[in-house]
């Protein structure tokens, strides 16, 4: 019956019906235009900001709670873009009503909650995906290309940072520990997911997770070092970095790559650019990363100029997440980011907190939950 209901709209020519839970920054600025850009139908929004939702989406039903959303006759996919501590219960309710689900990262607040959701999705034969959109950043796609093509040689060190200068604590849920706030869940989820995509599970990690600003109620910085054989990965965030340009630095046996500045897609969506715009996701040449070739003392090598050679950036493509989500619902197959992969991110977060609290290195002795 569930499959028959899901296929009914498509048999009559109707697109996948999507309900959006939440209407804050992420829902409004990121999810909404990408859902619409995929060709799926946004039919309802659950929010307390009902006037804002009606103004932005005059054709949709604006509802007050998730229960009302799940009672709709036509609903295929539920997208959850609410504060982190609500993800688990809302996702579980949607799955138990037989709906496919996208959850903004993090999937949940613990690996135990993630396991519950994965098992529930399997029981109900629902697709469960997690919005790790930074897999489709221009600079990360460029970095993956360099690694795949071995343009740096074997990678020995990788550094990814997301530093900011926000010296004042603000009154918002992302600053509240009880709401699943803090930069480790927020920005750390992206950095960890990218590192796992590149290198898989580390052999070990050691971390410091901390709050440095006066009045901080959740972590506002972290430093994570992960090792796999002789390769080292360093991930970090500071909320007190006036100089916050560095994004990526990677060293290989033949060359190094350095990249500054953030991907342009969020800025473009904030400005109202459509994901279908010809300029969407294109990084300006002035922001491209650069490769410096290794130079052996007394031998040949080295790049022209002190700053190395610019690397043409891949086009960023956040739209690919929802395009792939639509395809996996219509045709079957794997979701764009599996819940298992998101569960592995949570496993690293839990290990980082444990390492920081105990002041010790955490060893990993088992494989990833599932393939990335």
Image (cartoon, helix red, strand yellow):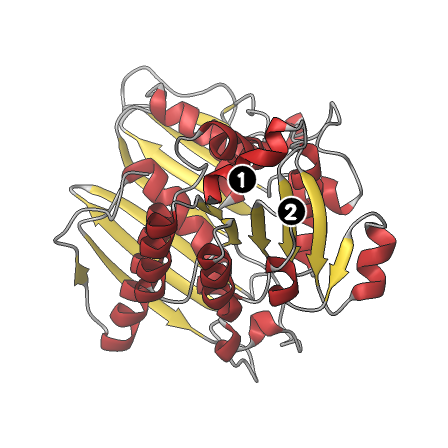
Res 74 label: 2
Q: Residue sitting at 40 percent across and 47 percent down?
A: 193
Res 193 label: none
Q: Residue sitting at 58 percent across and 69 percent down?
A: 174
Q: CA distance from mark 1 to mark 2?
A: 9 Å
Is residue 146 shown above or below 239?
above
Is residue 105 shown above or below 216?
above
**Element on which disc 1 rests:** helix
Residue 143 in the image: x percent, y percent?
44, 31
* Among numbered discs 1 and 2, the one appearing first in the sequence: 1
Q: Residue sitting at 41 percent across and 29 percent down?
A: 144
Q: Is residue 60 left or right of residue 333?
A: right
Quick one: label 2, few (<14), some, or many (20+) residues within 10 Å?
Answer: some
Asked whether 150 or 85 is in front, the reply is 85
Q: Quadrant of the C terminus?
A: top left
> What residue would you read off at disc 1?
6
**Element on which disc 2 rests:** loop
């Amino acid at each position: 019956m569930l499959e028959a209901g899901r296929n009914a709209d498509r048999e009559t020519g109707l697109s996948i019906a999507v309900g959006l839970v939440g209407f804050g920054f992420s829902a409004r600025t990121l999810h909404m235009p990408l859902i619409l850009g995929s060709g799926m139908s946004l039919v309802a929004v659950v929010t307390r900001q009902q006037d804002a939702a009606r103004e932005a989406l005059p054709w949709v039903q604006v509802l007050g709670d998730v229960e009302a959303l799940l009672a709709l006759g036509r609903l295929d996919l539920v997208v959850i873009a609410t504060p982190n501590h609500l993800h688990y219960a809302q996702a579980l309710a949607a799955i138990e009503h037989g709906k496919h689900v996208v959850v903004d990262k993090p999937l949940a607040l613990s690996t135990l909650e993630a396991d519950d959701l994965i098992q529930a999705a399997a029981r109900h034969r629902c697709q469960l995906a997690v919005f790790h959109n930074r897999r489709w950043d221009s600079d990360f796609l460029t970095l993956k290309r360099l690694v795949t093509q071995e343009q740096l040689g074997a990678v020995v060190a990788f550094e990814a940072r997301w530093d900011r200068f926000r010296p004042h604590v603000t009154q918002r849920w992302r600053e509240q520990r009880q709401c699943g706030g803090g930069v480790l869940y927020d920005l750390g989820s992206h950095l960890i997911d990218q590192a796992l995509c590149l290198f898989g599970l580390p052999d070990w990690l050691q971390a410091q997770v901390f709050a440095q600003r006066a009045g901080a109620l959740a972590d506002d910085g972290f430093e994570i070092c992960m090792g796999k054989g002789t390769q080292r990965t360093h991930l970090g965030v500071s909320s007190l970095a006036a100089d916050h340009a560095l994004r990526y630095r990677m060293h290989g046996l033949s060359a190094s790559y350095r990249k500054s500045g953030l991907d342009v897609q969020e800025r473009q969506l904030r400005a109202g650019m459509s994901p279908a715009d010809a300029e969407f996701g294109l990084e300006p040449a002035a922001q491209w990363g650069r490769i410096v070739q290794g130079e052996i003392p007394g031998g040949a090598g080295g790049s022209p100029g002190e700053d190395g050679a610019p690397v043409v950036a891949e086009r960023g493509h956040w739209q690919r997440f929802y395009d792939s989500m639509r395809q996996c619902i219509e045709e079957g197959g794997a979701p764009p980011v599996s819940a298992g992969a998101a569960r592995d991110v949570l496993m690293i977060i839990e290990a980082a907190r444990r390492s920081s609290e105990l002041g010790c290195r955490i060893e990993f002795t088992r494989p990833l939950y599932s393939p990335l």
